[in-house]
Image: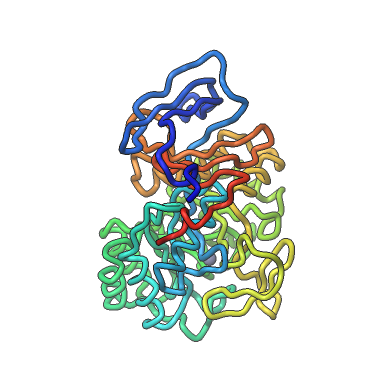
Amino acid sequence: MDRRMDTPIDRRINGHIWDSRARRFQPGEITWNREGVIDGVRPRASVERQWIVPGFLDQHVHGAGGADTMDGSHQRLATMAAELAKYGVTGFLATTLTASPEALLAAVTAAGDYVSERGAELLGLHLEGPYLDPEHRGAQPPAWIRAADRGELERLIDRAQGRIRLVTVAPERPGALETIAWLTAAAIRVNMGHSGADFEAAQRGADAGADGVTHLFNGMPSLHHRAPGLVGLALSDPRIRVEVIADGVHLHPAVVGMVWSAAQGRVIAVTDGISAVGLGPGRHRLGELEVEVDERAVRLPSGTLAGSKLTLAQAYRNLLEWNVDEADVIDSLSTLVAERFGWDDRGRLAPGCRADAVVLDADRTILKTLRAGRLIYHRGNPPTQACEEA
Ligand SMILES: [Zn+2]
């Protein structure tokens, strides 16, 4: 067993530490207690040449390392969690695909009682569908897209043991507004997406409680100056968080810059990653679908984009390369996600917060990932058996 992995280490680390309030790095040392809660962040004159930022949080990720949320098994969730830790992720929402009622129930049941101290932490579920617009389905299987069904949602929430945190809904579909209001009242966040909503329909969705948009520009009509639609609502309404897939395929880098100009402080970086994350090119799966993966993109045989093979580690570097301010990058990868879901002890490196951190070198390559002060990834020491689920 590799003692360096997944064991309590020194309970201290030093480097250039991200200060979310000052929005800059400060040389110092972080210490944490036995429970993995930060008990001190102190300035220090001389530190190691490394940069420490809050652990990344991915609210939209389907799979990684060959595993998919729709596999519906603890072992596959553990594979996914271990793989995501390599990319700085300390917490994620396992994301489902539109599927039959039985397949969805199986997936949320597995996630509902999944407990793991290893790898990234499963913080809940994101249901991407099935209450979507078939015309804007992207890679969501059309056969299972259906009208919003309160009874089904109640069963899913029950079987997920309350762990559903986010649902993507097309607001213009039958029953959608009532569903959005009902979910919001149950403290479940709603993204609008895979939708043909016009501006007014999107506004009604926001009025009903939706506070986010799933992978902006993808799975919805483009922005038109006389018909701004969901994109126009997302960019102009301060209530809305916008998901961005910063892989250079889903959005042109110039568009990413435009999104930040319009929606600064409410852009959330996601991967929409699938099982192929961490694997080579070739044929892979997304739920029950077979997809083709090359060096840059994941597509259905028809050519439609089907999720991505992006990691948040790569998104960090892409966004810096595209001249997004590093403070905004860190906010979008961590702080804003924690704030959205009310995870008060995440998304910042401050006393009282969990010691969930990513340690980076000068090039922003990941050296280590810490979850509650425990090493869940160390560069050069790929996770061994000790890091896998028993
Ligand atoms: Zn997705």
* Residue 137 seen in the current view: no
| In the image, farthest residue toward the top | 45
Pick the front one: 63 or 132: 63
Residue at 47% over, 23% down: 29
Q: Residue furthest bottom?
A: 143
- The x and y percentages for residue 111 are 36, 66
Left of 99 or right of it: where is 299? right
Please state which of residues 339 and 175 is positioned toward the viewer in this rendering.
339
Q: Residue at x 46, y 74 (%)?
A: 71
Residue at 27 percent across and 65 percent down: it is 161
Q: Is residue 280 left or right of residue 69?
A: right
Image quadrant occupied by the C terminus: bottom left
Q: Residue at x 33, y 32 (%)?
A: 33
Q: Position of residue 81 (x, y in %)?
A: 47, 57
Q: How many marks?
A: 0
| Residue 314 higher or lower than 218, as above or below | above
What is the quadrant of residue 368 in the picture?
A: top right
Q: Quadrant of residue 211?
A: bottom left
Q: Farthest residue toward the right?
A: 295
- Is 174 drawn above or below residue 248 in the view shown? below
Residue 228: % across, % down: 58, 59
Asked whether 377 or 127 is in front, the reply is 377
Tell me residue 155's x, y (percent). 27, 75
Question: Looking at the image, can residue 244 be seen?
Answer: yes
How is the structure coloured here?
rainbow
